[in-house]
Amino acid sequence: MDEIKGKERPGPLRISAKIRRLTGRAIYRYDMITPGDRIAVGVSGGKDSLLLLHILKFIRTYSPVKYDLQAFSVDMTNGQWNPAPLQTLCDSLQVPLHVIPYAIEHIIDVKREESPCSLCANLRRGILNAAAQKAGCNKLALGHNLDDVVETGLMNLLRNGRFRSFQPKLWHDRAEMWLIRPMIYLSEFQIRNELHRLGVATFQHCCKYGADTERSRTKSLIAELKPRFPDLKQSVLHALEHHAPADHWTATPRLYAGVYESDRPVSDSERQSDL
């Protein structure tokens, strides 16, 4: 995981106009935030979640839509990770921080999962949902970005034969919680540049499973394709948002199923009965 070095400053930082515009477009288009929301922000200390926290804090200072913010972080080492830098940041933003220790790394070691990223993501999301619900929150905000959208779409297409990605806004019945992803229109490049401009440091726990995964291989594939298809990410995003019914291959009723599924000649009486 890339680490961005910088110096933390007290209070909400001024987010650039382009970042605000793209985030605001996602929030507005998918009706992510409504008055009175109590939003739990999943924060790992990485670039995506830290920028998301800063964006939502800054937007709240001028938006007529009033909402509450709390930060939640899962310590996947079950107590070996030091959350002090994250606590200092949240204190400077005046956002309450909840740290939930959980032995996720140990669970993955024991299970020896072929797809540790998927298991880890599901465990963390479940833990965050439960903690957010206990704290009285009604929405969980995660920092998935445009690169994540495209990678997930291509992984599903190439591995599962389905062109789909995660939803920008999703209702979880069991947790009774809305999941929102306000940064789906921001690329990793834009996120990294914005954090550098703001001078915000990252301090995420380094996952030992992140080097060789299906997602990392898909990311490499996209990097190889980008010189030939420079608009690849935007094209995938457009396809996800504008998949028209006319694009589907829709099967029609088969009146003459017997003709195609059997070598037996069809008699005149059978043809008449189909008409």
Image: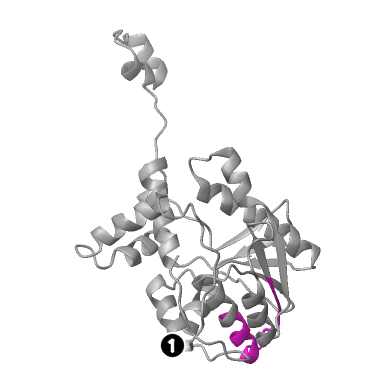
Answer left or right for 212 relative to 6: left
Residue 233 quadrant: bottom left
Q: Give the answer, above or below, for where 11 lies relative to 108.
A: below
Answer left or right for 194 relative to 46: left
Q: Quadrant of the C terminus?
A: top left
The scheme the figure's colours follow is one colour
Position in image of residue 270 (x %, y %): 37, 12
Mark 1 neighbour class, 10 Å CA radius: few under 14, some 14 to 19, many 20 or more: few
Q: Give the answer, above or below, for where 44 lies relative to 105.
A: below
Position in image of residue 5 (x %, y %): 46, 80
- Residue 52 visible (yes or no): yes
Q: Give the answer, above or below, for where 131 lies relative to 112.
A: below
Q: Nearer the viewer, residue 152 or 64?
A: 152
- Residue type at tag 1: Arg
Q: Which residues are magenta?
A: 55-71
Work out which residue is located at the far front of the displayed protein and give it.
80
Q: Nearer the viewer, residue 272 or 31?
A: 31
Q: Quadrant of the N terminus?
A: bottom left
Residue 174 lies in the magenta stretch = no
Q: Give the answer, above or below, for where 30 lies relative to 215.
A: below
Residue 18 quadrant: bottom left
Q: Which residue is mark 1?
A: 197
Position in image of residue 6 (x %, y %): 48, 84
Point 73% across, 64% down: residue: 132
For label 1, the SS is helix
Residue 60 lies in the magenta stretch = yes
| Count of numbered badges drawn on the protein | 1
Point 66% across, 52% down: residue: 103
Work out which residue is located at the far left of the displayed protein and give it.
228
Point 73% across, 55% down: residue: 175
Position in image of residue 155 (x %, y %): 40, 49
- Residue 244 visible (yes or no): no
